[in-house]
Image: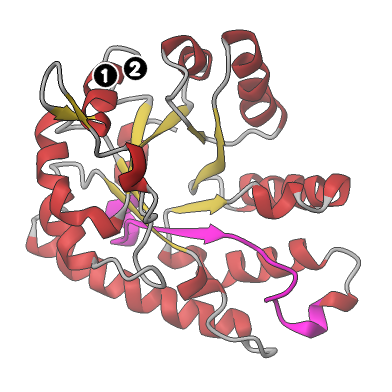
């Protein structure tokens, strides 16, 4: 999917919502546990209920690989269902991969060729050769971890480099700009770090940002939008638990749709106010 195609879908749906499919067997409605593949049945119901309000889905791979081969089957069924039934929706493998070149090449093959995701999250710690294999696929995206939403982000990501007086996350962004471009590289910036978005936008004015942390983690959609929007929207704001676990009853999909619609309506107001729809 190209940057322009993604933006066109944002304008069409008046939304920049990404729904995280962090599907936990301990949290899904109990009646689904009787199904042959409860993870997929839950995902399918959530997708069908929320697709009109969202432009992206982000399965967190840990929630699938924790169940071994059965979990991978559920993930494969989920991405196949999305690609077949909602081909206009951007898909993100939240895998946080990143290793030496030949290993990263295999990770890229797994998610881009085998499962046909549009994008994959990648950790930049090992440098350019660990990221570049993901950039070799036309129409696919690297989503590089830059400034994450967890409390532990302050352990390393904000440490100041004494050689240039810049925090690590800024050095990561500035250096990685040479590895990709605005058509194949996005960055993860947590909604709980919304006050830092303006400075990040000054470094990468045109790249899309994947912003987790709105909803259950307490991030503000208004603050994120105020500091992070660009002339192509440039944001994919993720909500996982706040949408998919809105109800644990048989009406779970309906309640998820209501919550997704609520967020979409907020996004529509923001997009309209910024002349982006």
Q: Dot 2: what SS?
A: loop
Of 76 and 106, nearer the camera is 106
- Magenta span has 241? no
Work out whether residue 277 can be spotted: no
Q: Residue at x 54, y 25 (%)?
A: 98
- Residue 242, how many percent across, how many down? 46, 74
Q: Above or below — where is 168 with respect to 220? A: above
Q: CA distance from mark 2 to mark 1?
A: 6 Å
Residue 69's image quarter?
Answer: top right
Q: Circle 1 sits on which residue?
A: 177
Q: Dot 1: what SS?
A: loop
Residue 14's image quarter?
Answer: bottom left
Q: Quadrant of the N terminus?
A: top left
Magenta stretch? 9-32
Query: How many discs mark residues in the rendered view?
Result: 2
Q: Circle 2 sits on which residue?
A: 180
- Residue 42, how many percent across, how many down? 71, 69
- Residue 29, how many percent across, how many down? 72, 82
Work out whether residue 190 can be spotted: yes
- Magenta span has 18? yes
Q: Above or below — where is 265 with respect to 251? A: above
Q: Residue at x 10, y 45 (%)?
A: 198
Of 33 and 53, nearer the camera is 33
Q: Quadrant of the C terminus?
A: bottom left
Of 228 and 170, nearer the camera is 170
Are dots 2 and 1 in contact, CB under 8 Å? yes
- Left or right of 163 on screen, residue 45: right
Residue density around tag 1, few if under 14, some if 14–19, many if 20 or more, within 10 Å: some
Q: Above or below — where is 260 with respect to 5? A: below
Residue 261's image quarter?
Answer: bottom left
């Amino acid at each position: 999917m190209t940057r322009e195609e993604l933006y066109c879908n944002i304008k069409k749906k008046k939304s920049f919502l990404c729904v995280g499919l962090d599907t936990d067997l301990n949290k899904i409605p109990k009646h689904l546990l009787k199904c042959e593949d409860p993870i997929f049945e839950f995902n399918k119901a959530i997708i069908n209920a929320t697709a009109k309000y969202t432009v992206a889905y982000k399965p967190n791979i840990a929630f699938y690989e924790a169940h071994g081969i059965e979990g991978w089957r559920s993930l494969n069924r989920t991405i196949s269902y999305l690609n077949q039934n909602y081909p206009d929706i951007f898909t993100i493998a939240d895998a946080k991969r990143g290793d030496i070149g030949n290993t990263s090449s295999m990770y890229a093959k797994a998610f881009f060729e085998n499962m046909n995701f549009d994008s994959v999250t990648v950790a930049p710690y090992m440098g350019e050769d660990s990221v570049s294999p993901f950039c070799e696929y036309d129409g696919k995206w690297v989503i590089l971890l830059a400034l994450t939403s967890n409390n532990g982000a302050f352990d390393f990501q904000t440490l100041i480099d004494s050689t240039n007086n810049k925090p690590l996350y800024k050095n990561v962004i500035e250096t990685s700009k040479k590895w990709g471009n605005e058509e194949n590289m996005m960055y993860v910036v947590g909604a709980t770090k919304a006050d830092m978005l303006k400075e990040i936008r000054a470094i990468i004015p045109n790249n899309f940002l994947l912003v987790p942390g709105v909803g259950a983690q307490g991030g503000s959609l208004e603050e994120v939008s105020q500091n992070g929007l660009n002339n192509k929207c440039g944001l994919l704001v993720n909500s996982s638990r706040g949408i998919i676990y809105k109800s644990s009853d048989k009406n779970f999909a309906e309640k998820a749709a209501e919550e997704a619609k609520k967020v979409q309506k907020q996004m529509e107001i923001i997009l309209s106010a910024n002349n982006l729809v």
